[in-house]
Amino acid sequence: MRRCRYAVSVKRSVGAADTRSPWRRGARAIGVAVVVSLLGTSCTPAAPTTAHIALISAGVRVEPDGTRTEIPAGETGAGASLEEILWLGEGTVPGAGTRYEALARRALLDLRALTVPVRLDDGTQAFAAVAGWDPKWRYVWPRDGAFAAVAFAQTGHLAQARGILRFLGSVQGDDGAFQARYLPDDSGRVPDARPQQYDAAGWAMWATAMVRAQIPAADVAAFDAETAPLLRRSVGYLLRTTVDGTRLPPASPDYWETRSHRVTLGTAASALMGLEAGADLGMVAPGVVARYREVVVAAFGSFGYPRDRGYLGSIGQTASDGATAFIAPPFVSSALPGATQARKDALAAMMRPAGGLAPGGSWRNDGISWTPSVGVNALSAAYNGDPAEAYAWIDWIGAHLTTVGSIPEKVLADGSPAAVAPLGWSDSLVLLTLIRLESATRDS
């Protein structure tokens, strides 16, 4: 049996962090304490390699003329412009008045910088929410856009939220399917020949329902009219591919962005969240949702919700991954049986030396943490009764920012930010987590 080395590595790094600011030392200590308690004795991953990926940029700056410019790695950015300050004032900043305010302000401004206006053929204003500003990330992934729409809506920036949904509706195929990613313009074209990603329809449905909950009553009718084509196509697609909720959807790449010959938990979960959203909107019969929940539980739950179910029973199944968060609130109305424990069990295999998480237990063992994986678990913990864990993950993200204060996509084994920054998906996850934590505090 392989010994758990991640927890030991993380513990030792805490003592070496004395040169950091008190905020960073405290964040690391809190995060490690929670993570180690979650790992217990079930942690079995082997010692990781230590891959190195350069930090491409420290952040992105919006120029006075509206153009975006990458801030080189290592540089510090200027303070918020008057325009940005005024825009922030139009909504709310999660964590205002707390140690999290600066993190939330930067995440909101970065998300705004990554969301560019697009004029559609019919003259309506849409917004394309790109993943990052480096050319390799400057595309719209429907999944990332869905999270951005919800984050904008819940912080009071409904123009961006509705505009993102308009963009998704404009690029969706007539059959309800989405491509993996799109160019951030009005062409509807894709940058390459990546296969379609099934989960996009479910994410679009989930986001539409979440945004709708923030629309003022006087505007709901107009919102319903403008999102009707997106919803109608998505519902039809989900019902066809699950045969009215009686079977799993076809195999497809999911948020791992890798080919899959088996239906992953992430793909199966996306159909559930989409069907549930459709039921909430009166477009899907409740019985269809109930049937499909049973299908997912039977296929994955009996084996602890692995990423890939086995070929025969548990034979050939893979480890659990971050998709265990997608079978509990806020993605579905109530957690599937065993989902909460499955998510916590998955953390052991996903842990990385810097204290963050990989996308899954069977992800390559390169020592790299991914901030979206950390953010997804923070959001899930916040919605499912574990605020201490949620705050610990947010503290960890806050301790691994770039010199500008932006959230990077990755964090290396030594704690250095890496790859692109900012990453819109991570920005959205941090904002949504802080909003939920604030709401829970007010209601307690």
Image (tube, rainbow, N blue to C red):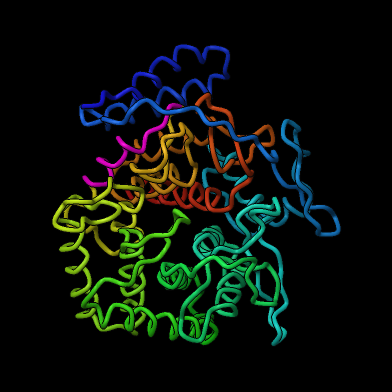
Residue 149, located in which quarter of the rendered image? bottom right
Residues shaded magenta? 341-353
209 drawn magenta: no
Q: How many marks?
A: 0
**Horizontal and vertical percent position of residue 215:** 50, 73
Side of 173 where 443 appears, left or right = left
- Location of the N terminus (image quadrant): top left
Side of 15 where 129 appears, left or right = right
Judged from this view, the residue extending furthest toward the right is 65
Main SS, magenta residues: helix
Q: Of 89 and 396, which appears nearest the observer?
A: 396
**Horizontal and vertical percent position of residue 413:** 50, 27
Side of 301 where 382 appears, left or right = right
Vertical order, 431 against 182 (above or below) = above
Side of 102 where 13 appears, left or right = left
Residue 218 visible in the displayed image:
no
Vertical order, 20 against 265 (above or below) = above
**Horizontal and vertical percent position of residue 437:** 40, 46
Residue 268, located in which quarter of the rendered image? bottom left
x 51%, y 81%: residue? 227
Vertical order, 387 against 191 (above or below) = above
Residue 329, located in which quarter of the rendered image? bottom left
**Horizontal and vertical percent position of residue 356:** 44, 34
Residue 17 visible in the displayed image:
yes
Vertical order, 35 against 428 (above or below) = above
x 57%, y 66%: residue? 181
